[in-house]
Amino acid sequence: MSVDEPVGLEPWNAAWPVPSAAELDGLRAYLRAVPVERDEFAQASGRPPQYLIDLLARARRFEVFERVTQVVRPALVPELQLRQSADVVAAWRAAEECEGAQQPAPFWAYVWAGGQALARWVLDHPEQVRGKRVLDFACGSGVSTVACARAGATALTAVDIDPFAVVATRVNGALEGAALDVQQRDLIGTDEGWELVLVGDVFYEPKTSERVVAWATALSARGALVLVGDPRRKYLPTRGLEELARYTLPVDPEWEGVSERTPCVWRLRPTASGRMPGRTSDAGLRRKAAHRQPA
């Protein structure tokens, strides 16, 4: 198969499946947008066919992400630029059309309040990040990941179980000139020696929240600094949180169901437990889920 080196498609492994012309165009666009992927591709000729299959899937998700989002400067961190959607239903439908199946809410398409709070705190306290091994758990759009990269984290890993979030974080990192290590993994229950762990906007559901709290408190107990960014969602722990900062910012009612949030950054102590009673912060998404048309 012949491909053009100027668009970053050399070397090519003859054992790889042959993409369509449209897939090649999408791959070229993705590699241009995300230099870290382009650099990996340049060294990938010996990898198995599954590598190209996965890369083409990321390129398809990139096309969706770019199509349904625009570059914005988030309210709490205007020094950063990230892509965000103004239409949750359009983002959701586009993801489902891309995957050919129902998808979870597109958390990757919006820069959430808790993530912004963490990003603001990180940029204001770079000494807590510089030279550290950092994990951004459930990275979503990657706003706190990008902030950590700017603040000088030595080893920075971002993870999310949603493959669209992986693409979103890589693209948003590239907008800021950051080559990010972003992985699609469920790391709950593991410990890879991180010194700083960021947990933003994850306390939506009871079972997931219980798993996250048990894991994060164990990391805190062995000495990691675990920071939670959250606007008091329903299943946020009620005990073992030390408030470090509080912010107020405008948010998009299309996503949040309200026009303003007051997220906090907390240090999670080993004694964290309980849940925040009586406040649900995902009303906007729940309403959209109830009214959207399935793909």
Image: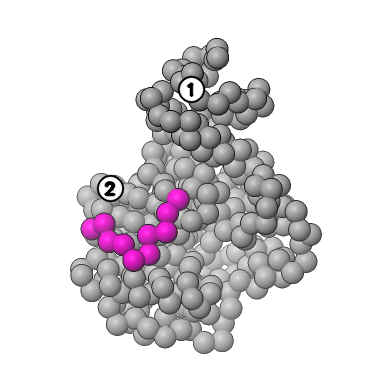
Q: Is residue 174 visible?
A: yes
Q: Residue at x 67, y 70 (%)?
A: 286
Quadrant containing the N terminus is top right
Say if the magenta span includes residue 4: no
**Please, is residue 22 above or below residue 90 in the view?**
above
| Residue type (three-letter) at the residue carrying disc 2 | Ala
Q: Residue at x 52, y 54 (%)?
A: 162
Foreground pick, 157 / 161: 161
Q: Which residue is mark 2?
A: 155
State the extent of the magenta-drawn residues as a range.
184-193
Q: Is disc 1 placed on a helix, strand or loop? A: loop
**Please, is residue 24 above or below residue 237 in the view?**
above
Say if the magenta span includes residue 192: yes
Residue 199, image x and y in percent? 40, 65
Q: Which residue is mark 1?
A: 15
Q: Residue at x 65, y 47 (%)?
A: 99
